[in-house]
Structure formats: structure tokens, C-alpha cells
Image: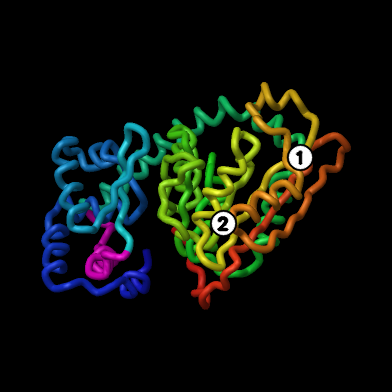
Amino acid sequence: MSLERAIAAPALAFSNALGVLRAAAEETRLRILALLAEGELSVSDLTDILGQSQPRISRHLKLLVEAGLVERHREGAWAFFRLAEGRLALVDPLLAGLEREGPPLSEDRARLEAVRGQRAEAAQSFFARLAPKWDELRSLHVPEAIVETAVLETLGHRPIRSLIDLGTGTGRMLGLLAPHAERATGLDSSHAMLSVARANLERLGLNRVELRQGDIHAPPFARASFDLVVVHQVLHYLDDPARALREAARLVAPGGRLLVVDFAPHELEFLRESQAHRRLGFAAEQVAVWLAEAGLGSVTTRGLAPADHGQLTVTLWLATESEAPAEAAPARAVA
């Protein structure tokens, strides 16, 4: 988070400011805040990095959460912590001014890199088991680079205040779009896939992207929370894609957009067994009707046909919420 963004945060009442400063004014808690400035971490991560017991780290985190400096979210049996948005006007300048080349922060950072390395190794091992199936699927449609170029062209240069990628998987869409967004979030039902996404995003230097575990049919976010919602190559895995799109549309802010990327209708039945596909693609008109029924306005479509007949066509649908947006703020990278 930048210093400019911290200054823009709401001012704190005097009594609240004292509580925030007291929470930060302790060695371990200040070290935790400096580490969380690098991205979200679990209790286990922090115990490994700081060399302290789990109960002690948990107590410090509880105080930081109560002071509004840190946010906690569940991911299965795990709990992850990140710096809170909107309550850091006093603390961010302090973190930005810390000298990090000497101990203990330099040692903490070295251990953080070791933890991230272990995380990346575990994620790569998991992904390696899936790679043969994913490579088979990729060989059946136009290259990913062409799809990603089409995504960027379809979205254009309009600034993105807040982005969510529903069913984020390995975080590929977040890696593509988060650098253009002020705030970026990924949701997936699988803790294992979120581990892969977290490692991939850390490798790209996108440490401030928020990853959450949850059901695409019941995303744990308030209505109208995001001005760009992405559903990329997810619908064909679902029993009720129309319901998923209704829930996705619920998250779209006034004047915001919903981007869907999936396959056009096809007859490759083997994908049901080999890739767990529930649906063999979608007609452009069908998805457009679902989006309209979900309350979204104009829908544009674009098809990316493969070179070989009989392979998969990738379709992009972009729907816009009917109410015009307020004047957009310049986009800032999430890093």
C-alpha cells in the first residue's frame, strides 16, 4: 500500500488513534506489521519466521485485529492475516519509514523468502500432478496468450477500482489483471488451488492480492462490491451456471462490468470424464440471456476459433451494469 493511499484513509478519532499506536508500539507486533506489509501470512508462517510459539503469535494478532490494523479470514482449517484497509493512516508512514536492511527486519525478510520458497515448492508439486490434464485441454483451443490478449482488448483502458476473479484456480487472471487494478481479490473453493495461486502471485510480485476460500454460488462479499467481476473458464464445471452468474452479477457495482470466458458448444464428450466438465460449452445467446436475467445491461460477445476444425472455440462475454459509473479514479498497481 502506498503512502499516498494511506494519507487518503479516513482520519481516526483521537481515542482510536491512541489504541492503534499502542497496538503497534511493541517489538513483535511491529515486526508482524512489517511482514504483513509484504503480503498475507498464516499463523504458521509467522511462527516460523519469528521463532515464537503459536499461542504468543496468536495473542499479538488478536490485539492487532482488535485495533483494526489487521484483518483475518478463514481458508479451510487455516487462518490468514493481512493489513486492514482504511485504518492505516497513522501506521503506514511508520512502516514506510522503517529501515529494513538491518536486524531484526532483514532477518525476518530472509526467513519470509524461505517460507515463500517452501510454499512455492509445495504448490508446484501439486500443480505438476494436474499439469498433464491441463496441457491436454490447452491443446484443444487457441493459445492462452491469444485469450489473454483478447481479455485485455475487451476490457479496454477503463480504470479498475476493484476486481474479483471468481473461481480463480491458479490465479492466472489475477496475474494478468491485478497490475491494472487498485484492489484485487480471488475466490476459490479449493485450499490447494489457492495455495498454487498464492505462490504464483508471489512469484509475480503481486503480494497484496487478497485470496479467499468460498463457494462461487454464495460468494462471501457484499452486494455491489466490485466494478469488475471475472468468471474465467469456470461455468463448464458447474451444475447450475445460471445461478453462479446471478451471484456474480450481485457483486457488480453500479456501472461495473462482468466478464465471462468459457467454451462455445462442442461435442468432445471425453472432457466429462477426463476433465470433470459438467457442461459441453455454452451458446452465446444462452449466456447473454442469463446475464440479462441477472439484471445486467448490454452484453457484447467475441469468439476465438481454433485453427483446427473440431477443437474448442473460446467465447468472451462482457456485460455492463446499467447504471452509469461515477468518475473513475486512476488505476494503481497491486503489489
Observer-nearest of 138 and 161: 161
- What's drawn in magenta, residue-wise? 86-103
Mark 2: few, some, or many residues within 10 Å (few <14, many ≥20)? many
Between residues 259 and 88, which one lies in front from this camera angle?
Answer: 259
**Residue 266, how many percent across, how many down?**
79, 35
Q: Is residue 95 left or right of residue 297?
A: left
Q: Is residue 332 above or below residue 34?
A: below
Q: Residues within 10 Å of mark 1 (few under 14, many from 20)?
A: many
| Mark 2 or mark 1, earlier in chain | 1
Residue carrying label 1: 141
Residue 53: x, y in percent? 16, 35
Residue type, mark 1 in image:
His
In the image, 99 versus 52, the foreground residue is: 52
Which part of the image, by quadrant, shows the N terminus? bottom left
Instruction: Identify the image quadrant of the C terminus.
Output: bottom left
Name the element at disc 1: loop
**Colouring rule applied to residues:** rainbow
Q: Main secondary structure of the magenta part?
A: loop
In the rendering, which numbered label is found on residue 177? 2
